[in-house]
Image (spheres, rainbow, N blue to C red):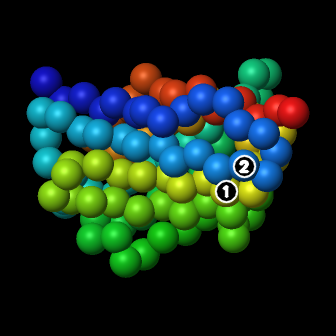
């Protein structure tokens, strides 16, 4: 059974950093584009970043450009989101997603506050 599991969320102070991981099981990610989304309470789900199958093409939402970096290690079947210079408005639940098969993880909560 295909599954995506996010981890690495938690609390951080403004200006701090967190790194999220998304590990797949039941399938191999190496052939697929993958994405990070986030959803804050009362807001629509927002595309944060996406990365192509080999990791050499990446795109970011304007709100996170220069602060977040998406990467992947296909040998570990894992995608990452390095988040730095965190802001309170980054507070949300973060989800990984494989668009070709509409696979979603359960999400991991990130809370940025002083």
- Residue 42 in the image: state x and y as whole percent: 79, 22
Mark earlier in primary sequence (1, 2):
2
User: Residue 50, how many percent across, how many down?
Assistant: 48, 59
**Quadrant assignment, res 31:** bottom left
Q: Nearer the viewer, residue 67 or 103?
A: 67
**What separation in Å lies between label 1 and label 2 (alpha carbons)?**
6 Å
Residue annotated with mark 2: 16
From the viewer's perspective, tell me whether residue 37 is left or right of residue 53: right
Q: Nearer the viewer, residue 12 or 106?
A: 12
State yes or no: discs 1 and 2 in contact (Cβ < 8 Å).
yes
Circle 1 crowding by C-alpha within 10 Å: few under 14, some 14–19, many from 20: some
Whole-percent x, y for residue 83 in the image: 61, 53
Q: Residues within 10 Å of mark 2 (few under 14, many from 20)?
A: some
Q: Secondary structure at mark 1?
A: loop
Which residue is disc 1 drawn over? 84
Q: Quadrant of residue 54?
A: bottom left
Res. 102 in view? no
Q: Name the residue at 19% across, 51% down.
A: 76
Residue at position x 83%, y 39% in the image: 88
Identify the element where label 2 is drawn: loop
The outermost residue toward the right is 114
Q: Is residue 10 visible?
A: yes
Quarter of the picture holding the N terminus: top left
74 relative position to 51: left or right: left
Is 37 placed above or below 11 here?
below
Q: Position of residue 65 (x, y in %)?
A: 69, 67
Asked whether, in this view, residue 9 is left or right of residue 75, the answer is right
């Amino acid at each position: 059974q295909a599954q995506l599991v996010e981890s690495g969320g938690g609390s951080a102070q403004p200006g701090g950093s967190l790194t999220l991981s998304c590990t797949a099981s039941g399938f191999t990610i190496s052939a697929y584009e993958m994405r990070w989304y986030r959803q804050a309470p009362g807001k629509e789900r927002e595309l944060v970043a996406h990365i192509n199958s080999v990791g050499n093409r990446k795109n970011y939402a304007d709100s996170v450009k220069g602060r977040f970096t998406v990467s992947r290690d296909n040998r570990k079947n894992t995608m990452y989101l390095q988040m730095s210079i965190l802001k309170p408005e980054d507070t949300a639940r973060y989800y990984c997603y494989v668009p070709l098969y509409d696979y979603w993880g359960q999400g991991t909560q990130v809370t940025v506050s002083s």
